Image: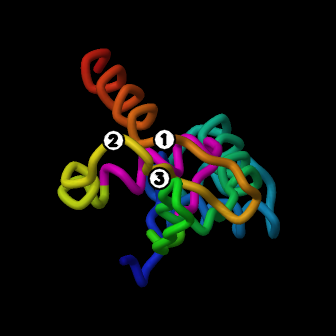
Amino acid sequence: MAAAPIYAGMRDHERDEAIAAARAAGTTDEVANRFQITPGAVRAACRRVRQQKTYELFLERHDGTRQRIGTVVTHKGFTAACVGAYRTYGEFFRGLELEGWRVTDASGSCNTLETIRKIISRTDTNG
């Protein structure tokens, strides 16, 4: 499906990476002044970059049928990666039957589509 990675749960990953690179070469206060942000925002951006993980996601059926979804980068974990892919390809996912499909990655982690839809409905109703 996807050629370019999906960045899930990240406001502006390019800016975060620029901030982290600048921080590697200077102090937090210098970077904060340069980007016109608070020192806490510098630390948070660096933390997001440090914690980000790349997931290669697949759509898998109980009979072993497997289709690549794409690459998702997030600092929030596997479930956030699944939700990001679902939101990006919502029309495709909504066309699938709930029964038998799940989202997996290379490590064997999985979430059923029903679980992902419940998470999305909770986050959409809570703001």
Which residue reaches farthest bottom? 3
Q: Decide: few, some or many residues near mark 1? Use Cα within 10 Å; few <14, some 14-19, many ≥20.
A: some
Name the quadrant of the N terminus: bottom left
Which residue reaches farthest front? 63
As for residue 30 lying within the magenta part, the answer is: no
Residue carrying label 3:
8
Q: Is residue 120 above or below residue 5?
A: above
As for residue 81 lying within the magenta part, the answer is: yes
Name the quadrant of the C terminus: top left
| Mark 2 vs mark 3, CA separation in Å | 23 Å
Residue at 28% from the left image edge and 54% from the top image edge? 93
Amino acid carrying mark 2 in the image? Leu
Q: Which of the two marks, 2 or 3, is nearer to us in this view?
A: 2
Per the image, label 3 sits on a secondary structure element best described as loop
Q: Name the spot of residue 88 as percent of width and height, x first.
A: 31, 58
Residue carrying label 2:
98
Residue 38 horizontal side relative to residue 20, left or right: left
Region rendered in magenta:
72-87
Between 22 and 124, the one nearer to me in the picture: 124
Looking at the rendered structure, which numbered label has been put on residue 86? none
Q: Name the spot of residue 76 as percent of width and height, x first.
A: 61, 42
Q: Which of the two marks, 3 or 1, is nearer to us in this view?
A: 1
Answer whether labels 2 and 3 touch (C-beta < 8 Å): no
| Mark 1 vs mark 2, CA separation in Å | 8 Å
Answer whether labels 1 and 2 touch (C-beta < 8 Å): yes
Q: Earlier in the sequence, mark 2 or mark 3?
A: 3
Residue 108 horizontal side relative to residue 38, left or right: right
Looking at the rendered structure, which numbered label has been put on residue 112? 1
Q: Decide: few, some or many residues near mark 3? Use Cα within 10 Å; few <14, some 14-19, many ≥20.
A: many
Q: Is residue 19 above or below residue 84?
A: below
